[in-house]
Image (cartoon, grey):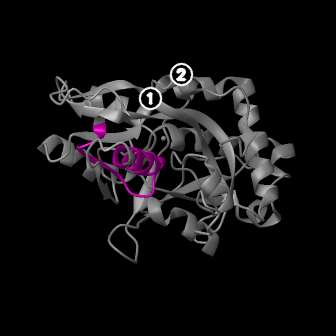
């Protein structure tokens, strides 16, 4: 979601609720306190429990996805969480949920943090849209990766799509509630204003469902973050390819509640520690996403 690191073994346990939300096990075993100074930075409740509950949509390879057993979460994010856990002396436990439900569930206390390839945006920080209208609670981000949105098309690019402007008059499939949807909605307005044909957006709860629409030919393109699009292209055996270059690069962030500043600062310190000791680089190289590396942990650096 390592070189010397062992891939995270996050057990996805069957849970109650709707058919899309399931509980997850630990993102790696932690020692009693890998770094006493960082362990002491955590709020006391986490020092007592030594567990941090993570909300994540575990269907977003290679950022986070289920292993062949259909239960174990693996990927960039689970591996990073395991490394952070060793620094903080706690275990990060992933729980699978619909992406669009993550921030509301964080606010209700279902999750302690969110680690789900989530773009750090102004709207998510403030809980307001571009007009200033309140659309939900805001969160803080500890930024750990940089990625832009890519256009994934069928082999040979049969509709000759090279940029967002070429999506006018086409159908695009994507995951609901993501920055890809925000980007597509902005492009749809430009298409309408320019009289270039309607851009139809098909939004799904899971990124995998959106990809199926592309495979079926029911959508001309799939919008997704670059590392995910590149992974899907590689795994497809040539069935898909990336068109053009990534648009609007932005940071991924670990989301925490606005009032949980002690948790935010502890995670930032742990992230800086694994960047400095080289674990961070090894994890990114393992998942072939080293181009998205950041030099330090920033808070709310997304625009």
SS for callout 1: strand
Residue at the outermost bottom position: 17
Q: Which residue is mark 1?
A: 246
SS for callout 2: helix
Callout 2 touching callout 1 (CB < 8 Å)? no
Q: In the visual, does 15 lie left or right of 110?
A: left
Quarter-of-image position of residue 133: bottom right
Q: Is residue 4 visible?
A: no
Q: In the visual, does 161 lie left or right of 282?
A: left
Sequence-wise, the earlier of marks 2 and 1 is 1
Closer to viewer: mark 2 or mark 1? 1
Q: Nearer the viewer, residue 139 or 272?
A: 139
Query: CA separation, marks 2 and 1?
Result: 12 Å
Q: In the visual, does 20 lie left or right of 149?
A: left
The magenta span reads 167-192
Q: Which residue is mark 2?
A: 291
Q: In the visual, does 258 lie left or right of 11?
A: right
Q: Is residue 234 magenta?
A: no
At a point 64% along the width and 51% down the height, the residue shown is 122
């Amino acid at each position: 979601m390592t070189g010397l690191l062992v891939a995270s073994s996050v057990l996805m346990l069957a849970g109650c609720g709707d058919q899309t939300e399931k509980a997850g096990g630990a993102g790696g075993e932690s020692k009693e306190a890998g770094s006493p100074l960082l362990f002491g930075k955590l709020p006391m409740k986490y020092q007592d429990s030594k567990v941090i509950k993570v909300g994540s949509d575990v269907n977003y390879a290679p950022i986070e996805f289920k292993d062949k057993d259909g239960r174990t979460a693996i990927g960039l994010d689970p591996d990073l969480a395991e490394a952070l856990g060793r620094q903080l002396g706690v275990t990060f436990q992933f729980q699978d949920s619909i992406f669009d439900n993550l921030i509301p569930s964080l606010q209700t206390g279902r999750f302690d943090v969110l680690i789900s390839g989530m773009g750090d945006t102004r709207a998510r920080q403030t809980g307001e849209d571009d007009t200033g209208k309140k659309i939900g609670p805001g969160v803080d981000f500890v930024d750990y990766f940089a990625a832009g949105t890519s256009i994934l098309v069928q082999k040979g690019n049969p509709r000759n799509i090279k940029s967002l402007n070429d999506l006018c008059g086409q159908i695009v499939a994507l995951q609901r509630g993501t920055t890809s949807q925000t980007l597509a909605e902005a492009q749809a307005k430009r298409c309408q204003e320019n009289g270039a044909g309607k851009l139809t957006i098909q939004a799904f709860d899971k990124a995998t469902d959106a990809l199926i629409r592309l495979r079926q030919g029911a959508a001309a393109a799939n919008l997704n973050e670059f590392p995910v699009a590149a992974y899907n292209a590689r795994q497809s055996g040539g069935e898909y390819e990336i068109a053009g270059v990534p648009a609007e690069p932005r940071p991924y962030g670990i989301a925490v509640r606005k009032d949980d500043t002690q948790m935010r600062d502890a995670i930032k310190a742990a992230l800086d520690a694994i960047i400095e000791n080289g674990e961070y680089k090894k994890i990114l190289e393992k998942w072939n996403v080293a181009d998205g590396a950041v030099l330090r942990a920033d808070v709310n650096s997304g625009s």
